[in-house]
Image (cartoon, coloured by chain):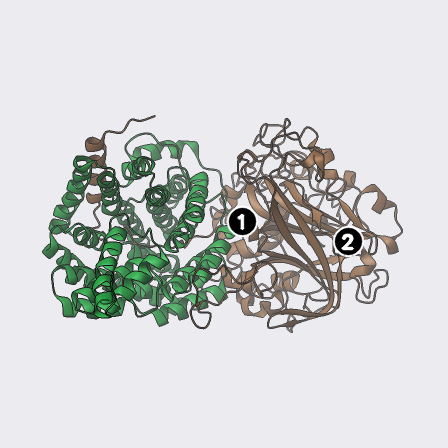
Chain colours: A green, B brown
Amino acid sequence: MSRPQRACAAATLVLVGLAGGPALAATPADRAVAVAEEHVANSRNRPDGYVELATAFMRKSRESGDPGYYARAQAALDHALALDRDDYGALRVQAWVLLGRHDFRGALAAAERARGVEPDDWWNYATIADAEIELGDYDHAVDAAQRMADLRPGLPAYTRAAFLRALFGDRAGAVEMLTLAAAAGSAQDPETLAWTLVQLGHEHFALGDLPAAAAAYGRALAVFPDYYLALGGLGRVRAAEGHLDEAAALYRRAVEQIPSPDLLAALGDVYAASGRPDDAERQYALVDYTGDVAEAVGTPYGRQLALYYCDHDRRLPAALQLAEQEAATRGGIYTDDALGWALQKNRRTAQAVRASHRALRLGTADALLEYHAGVIAAGAGRPRRAARHLRRALALNPFFDLRQAAVARASLAALDDPARLARGETR
Amino acid sequence: MRTWHPSTLVVAGLTLVLAATSPRAASHREAPLMTLDPAADITDVYAFVSYDTANLARASADRKVTLILNVIPAQEPSSGPNYFAFDDNVLYELHVDNNKDGDAEDVIYQFRFQTTVDTPAQFVATLAPVTALEGPNAAGMAIKQRYTVTELRNCKEKKNGPKCKQKTVLFSGQSKPTVPSNIGPKTMPDYAALAAQGIFTDAGTDIRVFAGQRAETFAIDLGAVFDTVNLRRTPLPVETAAEDANDAVNPFGVNAFSGFNVNTIAIEVPAKRLTGDGAAPSAANGTIGVYASTSRQQVTIRRGSPALNPKKPPAELLQGAKSFRQVSRMGNPLVNELIIAVGKKDLWNATDPADEALFLDFYRNLAVADALKLVSGVDVPAKPRNDIVHLLTQYADQNVSAAPFSELLRLDMTVAPTPPASIKRLGPLAHDAAGTATPDGAGFPNGRRPNDDVTDIVVRVAGGKNYVDNRVGDGVHINDRGLTPDFPFLPTPYDGRDRVHKDPGE
C-alpha cells in the first residue's frame, strides 16, 4: 500500500505563491511539497518531515528545471540534520542534493557515508554511480549501477544502465534499457516518465533516426505537456528535417520556461538558418549575458556556454576558461570533449589532441565527439585521421547539429580533395 | 494563451535561473531517483475460502479458495487519457506453502501480460461504446491487454528462478483479456456486465481467474495512522461497543482510499489443488501460507564488447526470456509499512519470505507499539514481542524459539466460510453491541478477506490486551461500496466520469 495521493487543497493554494509567477496548475511535485510542509508543521521536532520536504523540493527542481529549489532542499535537510546528525533518511538524500548542486566529490562522500550505514539500500549505489559518472570514474560507476540494478531493477536502474551502455558505445542496448524504463514509468509521476522518454528520443536522435526521436519526444509531451526538455528535443528534430519555423516555435516555448544557454543558442541557430540574423543575434546576446553573469558568480552551464562560444567563434578565451573550470570539478568524456574543443579554438593543438583522445576513450558512438576529434586532427595536420572522424560523425548522425553538421561536410570535402590529389587521382 | 514577448519573458526567466542562490546547479543528465513503480507495487493480498452462494453450499471437501493480488494503488478514476494497465515486463506471482516448511514454492501461480495497441493514432482511449472484451463490440478500445496463467508445482528456488516438477499453462496456453479501466457510462454503458465477461474458468483444473480494475476495499485513515498513529479520537475507550460492532458506519475516521480503484488479479482454486497431498483439507494438511510477489527483469549493464553496428535494433524481445528479480512482496498486511525500518524496506521487498529471520528484530522490537503507547499513554506488552514473531512468521503449531520463520498470510482452509451477511470486519476479535464476543474465525489473521478491518486488528494486536479492551482503531470500518458476495469479491470500480471520494453515509 502506498502513500496517499490526495493533497490538501489549502496547502496547494499556498503553493501557488511559492511557485511565483503566473498561477500554474499544481503539479505532482507541488502536491508533494504541500503534503511535506503539512507534515513539517505537524512535527517540527522530527527529521522525517524535513527529509520529505527536501525530497519534494528535489522533485520540484527536476520538474521545473529551476535550480533554486536545490537550495531549499538543502535548507530542509539542514533542519533534519540539526535535529539528528545521523538521521539515515537525511544522509541518503544529502548525496542527491549535492549531485544537483554539482558538488560531485561531496556527493560521492555523502553517498559512501550513507552506504556505510545501509549497504543494502539501492539508493546509495544510484548516487554513487551518478557521482562517479560525473567524476569520470566509469568502472566504479558501472560496478555501483550494476549493484543497484541487482538490488532493485526498475526505472532508476534502467535509466542509469542506458546511460552507461551509451557511454560504452552500446546505443542499441541503451534504447533497450530506456524502452524498459519507460514501460516501468507511470502517468502518476509524469515528469519521471517524460524525462525517460526524452532520453529515449535523444538516443534515437544520436543515431539520426528522426521519426523515432520525434515519436519519443511526442510521447513525453503527451504525458507532461510543455516539458522544456521534450520541446527542445522536438525542436532539434524539426530543425534537422528543415522545418525551421516549427523548430523556432518549439524552442520559443522551451526557453519561455527555462532560458538555458543551450536552448537559447539553438533558437538563435534556427533563426540564423532561416535568414533572420537579427533575431539570431538577439538570442546570442542573451546567451552572452548568461556568460557575463557566469563570470561574476559562476554557472551551472559551463559546458554549454563553452561549446556555444566555440561553435560561434565568440569569446574564445572565456570558453577555454569555462571548460578548464568545469574540468576542475567534473571529469568524464564530455568534460574532456568541451575542453578539447575550447583548446582547439584557442589554437592549443597539442593539448586539444590529448583531450580529444580522452573524450573518445570509451568508444562512445557520438557524432559531436567525432566531429570535434575530426576538426582537432585536421588542425594537428592529420588529414586522414580527420577525415575518418568526420565521416564517422556524419555516418552516425548526419543531423547532429544544425550549424556544425554543415561545417563537418565542408571540412570533409576540403580534406578529401587534397587526399585525392595526393593519390594522383584527377577530379 | 499567453503571447510571447521575447525580451521581457526571457530576461525575467533568466533572472530566475541566475538568481538561484546555488551557483552550480541544474543542467546535467540527472536520472530519476524516486520511483513509484505502481505497476509492481503490491497494495494488498487476500486469501480466503470463497463465500459466494455456490461455495457456501458445497461440501467442505469440494470448497474453493480465492487468492487475490492487487497492484497500482490509489487510482483516481478520472485519469483520462491515461488509464491503468498491468505491466508487460512485470512477473506477477502468488506463492503457496502447503507443507509448513516456510518455503512458499509448493504451488505458484504466474501471471504475464501482453499489451496490443490496435489503433496507435487514436488519442482517446476509446471511441465507440465498449460492450465486450473482444470482437467487434470491443473495437472502440485502442489498447487491449491479455494475460496467461501458469501453475507451477513442487518447485525449488534456484539462482535464476524456481525449478518445478510440474507446469500447467491454463486455458491450453491461450491468453485471456483483462478488464479495462471503468472510463464512464457513455463509453462503457454496462460496466458490471462487461467485467463479468472477464471471469474465465479453466476446464482442466476448475480454476477461475479475473484480471482487471476493481474498487479499493482496503479502508484506512491513512493520514492519521501514518502521522505516528495520530488517531482522530483518543479518549479511552476509543469506540463504544456499539460503534465498534457496527460494520456499516465509519464512526470518526476519514477513509483515504474512498473513491479510488486498484488493479486486481484474482484466482479461485479448488482447495484440493492447494493441499500438499491433493486430498480434501483436514487438520493435517489444511493450512497453507501465501504471499504475492512482483518481479522485474534483471539487467547486465556492460554486455561484453560494444555493439559492432550501433544502428542494429535490440537483439531480443524484452518480454519473457530474461531472469527476474523480486521487487515487491506481501503476505500479511502492513508489515512493510509498520514493522520494517526505513532503509530496509526495499531490501525486505526483494527478500524471500523464507529468509524472514533477517528481519526478526524489527518484529521483536515492534516500534509501532511504542508509538501507540506514546500517543495513548496506555501500556503495551513487554519486548521481545515473540507473539508478533509467531503470529506473522510461523504456523500455530510451530515454536517461536526455532526456525522456520517465514512471513506468510496463513489460511486454515478447514474453517468454513462465513456467509456475507454474517461476516465481521474484526474477525476473531468481533463482538456484538453489548461487547459480548462473536468471533468470526474465517477472517484475518486466518487468511484475509477484502473487507476485513486489518488496521484495527493490527493496532489492537500490536497494542495488546489494553488496546483490545479499549477498542482502539482508526474509526474507519468500511469503504462505501461495502462487501461483494461473488468472485472476484471486489466491487465494481468507480467510473471516471461520476467518481466521488466519500465515506458511507457521507
Q: Nearer the viewer, residue A372 or B81?
A: A372
Q: Give left or right: position of B120 versus B139.
A: left
What amino acid is labelled 1 in the image?
Answer: Pro
Q: Quadrant of the N terminus of chain B?
A: top left
Q: Quadrant of residue B289?
A: bottom right
Please tell me how crowded label 1 is: few (under 14), some (14-19), or many (20+) other residues with Cα within 10 Å: many
- Label 1 marks which chain's residue? B
Q: Is residue A333 above or below residue A402?
A: below
Badge 1 is on which residue?
B38
Q: Is residue A106 left or right of residue B265?
A: left
Which image quadrant for residue B219? top right
Please provide percent x and percent y for residue B244.
65, 39
| Disc 1 secondary structure class | helix
Q: Are marks 1 and 2 in contact (CB under 8 Å)?
A: no
Residue that label 2 marks:
B171
Q: Report the residue at 12% width, 55% height from top.
A: A316
Q: Is residue B332 above or below residue B4?
A: below
Question: For the residues marked 1 and 2, what is the alpha-carbon distance in whole angstroms?
Answer: 28 Å
Task: Tell me if residue A93 can be seen.
Answer: yes
Which residue type does callout 2 highlight? Phe
